[in-house]
Amino acid sequence: MSDNHYPALHDVDAIQQAFECAGYICTRRIATVVRLAAALEKPMLIEGPPGVGKTELAKTCAMVVDRPLVRLQCYEGLDESKALYEWKYGKQLLYTQLLKEQLGDVLEGAQGLSESMARLRQFSDVFYSEDFLESRPLLKVMEEQQGGVLLIDEIDKADFEFESLLLEVLSDFQVSIPELGTIEARSKPLVFLTSNDTRDLSDALKRRCLHLHIPFPTVGLEARIVESRVPDLTQSMTEQLVRFVQAVRSLDLKKAPAISETVDWARCLVLLHARDLDSELVTDTLNVLLKYEGDIQTAEGHLPKLMAAAAG
Amino acid sequence: MPEAKVSPSASSDQLLDFVQYLRGKKIPVSPADTLDAVEVAELTGYADRTLLKHGLAAALSKTKDELTLFEVAFDEYFHPRNLNSLANQSPIHSQNDVEPSPAPDRGPSSEQASEPNLEPLEGLRGNALFNALESQDEAWLSVAIEVAAAEAEVEEIILFTQRGQYVRKMLDALGDETLREAAIEFEQSEPAAFEAVQALREELRERVRDRVERAYLIHASAATEDLLDESLSKIKLGNVDHGQMARLKRLIDRMARKLAARHGRRRRRFRKGKLHVAETVRQAIPTDGVPFHPRWRKTERKRPQIMAICDVSGSVAAYAKFLLMFLYALQDLLPRTRSFAFSAALGEVSDLFAQLPVEEAIERVNLKYGGATDYGRALQDFSDLALAEVNSATTVIILGDARNNQADLKAYLLGEIKARARQVIWLNPESLRLWGTGDSEMLQVERHCHMARECNNLRQLEKIVDKLLSDRR
């Protein structure tokens, strides 16, 4: 067990506290999974609606364990040359040009073709060495001496082929480069994968991960999050706001507001020096909370009900 | 919590049992997952129930739905009520070598018979089972019950109705016979002793029943579920009753997922085609014009666009429902599916399906377009509405029994559709030998379709959709 790599993640309660100090209020479930992932050296697959703090969790974790965060944003068409490594073609070419001039010196006095080849061969490996290797995120995190935090964001956006590529990296923490052989991680990184569930991930990938589903938070939890993120908002306002948002989530919306939207809204209200949550204020600022015109109309239609919920 | 005291080996057996239980609840758990779970449990320990639950959930449940199922299953399985019996079970693992049949030597119990008329029970004092029951010797009873369970092969139980039979077998193995004979003997002469023996026997029976039910929950429900799914996929869809809808929906979703996985992959494999010269040259720039990486033109395989025309009149409505359910479960692979419903008139119902959950949409469709069937008018309406959009990528699926109440079916319209479309498939819920009998126009229809199939259960439906997706004409 590699608890000693990340001593900060040794105990569930300690994790919860450390994360809170770093400004991330997490549930016990989240802390448990982080603890297990660190101890079992398994990647974490985090799912949940957009904006509940999946990416933030990885960032906070990097902060808590005090290791560099390497982020790999996935998109369609992402391949190994962008995720893993690439040869520095330009540099290789330049060096070949330089070597050309010295070719005469090198081959001086060589007898016949086979001897010339033997001499040249001494140089061929130079071009495929780590000097000419451009590390991309996956390789970079493995080169970290003390281990790091790898965030593979929105894995569901990447192609199916890329997932297969990840399998080797995630289960053995090693990368195979045909010209160089297998490169192992100096120290096993903490891996976070996030998914917005736009497509099913392959079973092979799922099986290698610990699963964490982060749902929308409960009233109490959300109030604590808003408090820690927007300390300038008065307590009564925070409570009203959170109850309002919770009521909005129960409506039939295209995109329910997530924690990040709640926090944004809270910041807006602070900027506007709002003292009380009244319908006028809500109507004016609802576009911060909801991102679709249709959703805003739906919410406005239910405004009296929502206001009643906010009042508690 | 009592589980804190359970010895490690017992706990890991416990965990394996729990994994079995999860499989029964339709959460797929692979052996590798099980190993993960064991590791997790070693880390979390069994003392903190929530910690254990969160940890196991992370290792064993893979989706949101599975998580919900898992939480219910965990609470059921590790219910404090069950835990007591689990904790008591632990001696089995440590004392397996202890032969349960000879009675642990116990002298006449100190708190013996407070009432004098229980005197006759003295005759039973030599009986180990009786002693254990009377003194509530949990350890002895648990071991004896486990041994009896093994003897009765209780883990083989498949059906709920077999419970009685297994309880009987286990009681026999335990030696309940002696107690029964004693009870019969006392019944007339010694009412108090009779009561006492019967009470103990009832308690024993209760314990045995618990054991059998646990075996059923763990081992049989998984088998039974598979059996039900199996038979449901072969049953005529028209006969599926309301209670089975949820299961059927799950089954359809699973089949759809399977098809999606299969065909999603195949599409990519056929991508390599001709060399893409421009792209290859561009890629060769960093290598000084030497084309290290040939690029290929991607052959975009057109996904079939499906237009489903469904008869929703009484006799066929049920089948239409399942066809639409299936097609819409495949939304990922068939994103531009359009659906039309008719009975008397025909109308497009795609929007309904895009906006509402399938079940509700179907209810609405039935309300709106139900009535006496008129295929001629329906085909005419379809031609007016959508014929212009039928092209070489369109697959038209028509679901109906082609029974047109002796009216003209206007088969030439079907011919027009066939001429434009990639393919026209007619699905008929009636069995093949009824085609063409009575007012069925099926023989006439068949000529104007690329394919006409009997389709009245899920198996057939799956085959047809599979064919549809792999089609590369």
Image (cartoon, rainbow, N blue to C red):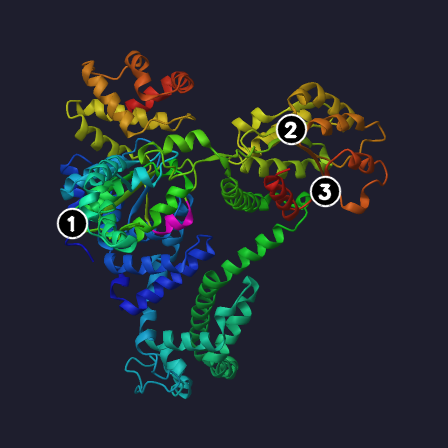
Amino acid tagged 1 = Tyr
Is residue B242 depicted above or below B122 in this figure? above
Question: Residues at marks 3 and 1, common chain?
Answer: no
Residue corresponding to mark 3: B453
- Depth order, front residue of B315/A72: A72
Q: Where does label 1 land, which residue?
A: A6
- The amino acid type, in three-letter code, at marker 3 is Arg
Quadrant housing residue B142: bottom left
Mark 2 residue element: loop
Alpha carbon distance from label 2 to label 1: 60 Å
Is residue A43 one of those drawn in magenta?
Answer: no
Dot 1: few (<14), some (14–19), or many (≥20) neighbours within 10 Å? many
Disc 2: which residue: B392
In the image, which is nearer the foreground, mark 3 or mark 2? 2
- Seen from the viewer's position, the closer of residues B416 and B46 is B416
Residue B2, numbered label:
none
Q: What amino acid is found at the position of numbered circle 2 in the picture?
A: Ser
Q: Is residue A28 visible?
A: no
- The magenta stretch spans residue A204: yes
Disc 2 residue crowd, few under 14, some 14–19, many 20+, Cα 10 Å: some
Indicate left or right for B284 with B40 as reference: right
Q: Quadrant of the N terminus of chain A?
A: bottom left
Label 3 with label 2: CB-CB less than 8 Å:
no
Tell me if residue B14 comes above or below residue B320 in the rendering.
below
A305 or A125: nearer the eye? A125
Question: How far apart are the two marked residues, 3 and 1, measured between alpha carbons?
Answer: 62 Å
Mainly helix, strand or loop, the magenta region?
A: helix
Sequence-first disc among 3 and 2? 2
Q: Which residues are magenta?
A: A202-208
